Image (cartoon, rainbow, N blue to C red):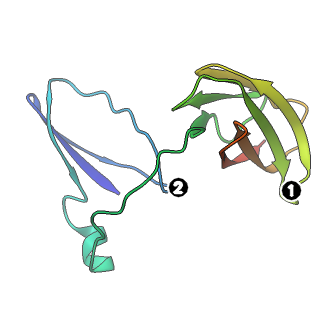
Amino acid sequence: MEYTIMTSQGDTTIKVYHDSNFEQLTVPVEGQVITVWVDPDNWVLNKVGSITVGVEETENPVFFTFGPNPATESVKLFMANTTDEVNISILDITGKTMKEVRESGETISLNTSDLPQGSYFIRINDGEASFTRRLVKM
């Protein structure tokens, strides 16, 4: 998806690959942001033909991002909506729990050096809600 960011210093177009329905992006730009255009050349809208407006989304209290992905020795989890203690599970593709820890904070470091190479899921649960993302271990 392309985004054009118009600032008091000019405009910048960036291309972002999205792999989930909700993602937070931080884009450093010079000057004050005046406006942001989503899909400025209508590539997506022309292909899809329509856009849905007014869909209400609920904010997941345990939404997180993490990196690096693929991981080698460790990953850092960045909690978007909570700093409370949460259960963190790493599951293999069959759903078997490979690692489980209980941590808290805005940024959590998770050791992955003991995991074999492969695809996994990181699931965070606060007792009421959970959120899962895919992890590749190299």
Residue at x 69% of width, y 36% of height: 126
Residue type (three-letter) at the residue carrying disc 2: Ser
Residue type (three-letter) at the residue carrying disc 1: Gly
**Viewport quadrant of the N terminus:** bottom left
Q: Position of residue 131 (x, y in %)?
A: 65, 47
Which type of secondary structure does the marked residue at label 2 adopt?
A: loop
**Viewport quadrant of the C terminus:** top right
Above/below status of 64 relative to 38: above
62 sits left or right of 123 in the view: left
76 sits left or right of 82 in the view: right
Residue at x 85% of width, y 45% of height: 117
Q: Position of residue 74 (x, y in %)?
A: 75, 27
111 sits left or right of 125 in the view: right
Disc on res. 20: 2
Above/below status of 10 relative to 128: above
Q: Position of residue 79 (x, y in %)?
A: 57, 30
Give the quadrant of residue 34: top left
The residue that label 1 is drawn on is: 95
Around disc 2, counting alpha carbons within 10 Å, would you say few (fewer than 14), some (14 to 19), or many (20 or more)? few
Give the quadrant of residue 7: top left
Which type of secondary structure does the marked residue at label 1 adopt?
A: loop
Give the quadrant of residue 84: top right
Depth check, front residue: 51 or 118: 51
CA distance for labels 1 and 2: 20 Å
Residue at x 20% of width, y 24% of height: 30
Above/below status of 128 relative to 50: above
Depth check, front residue: 17 or 78: 78
Residue at x 73% of width, y 39% of height: 127
Q: Earlier in the sequence, mark 1 or mark 2?
A: 2
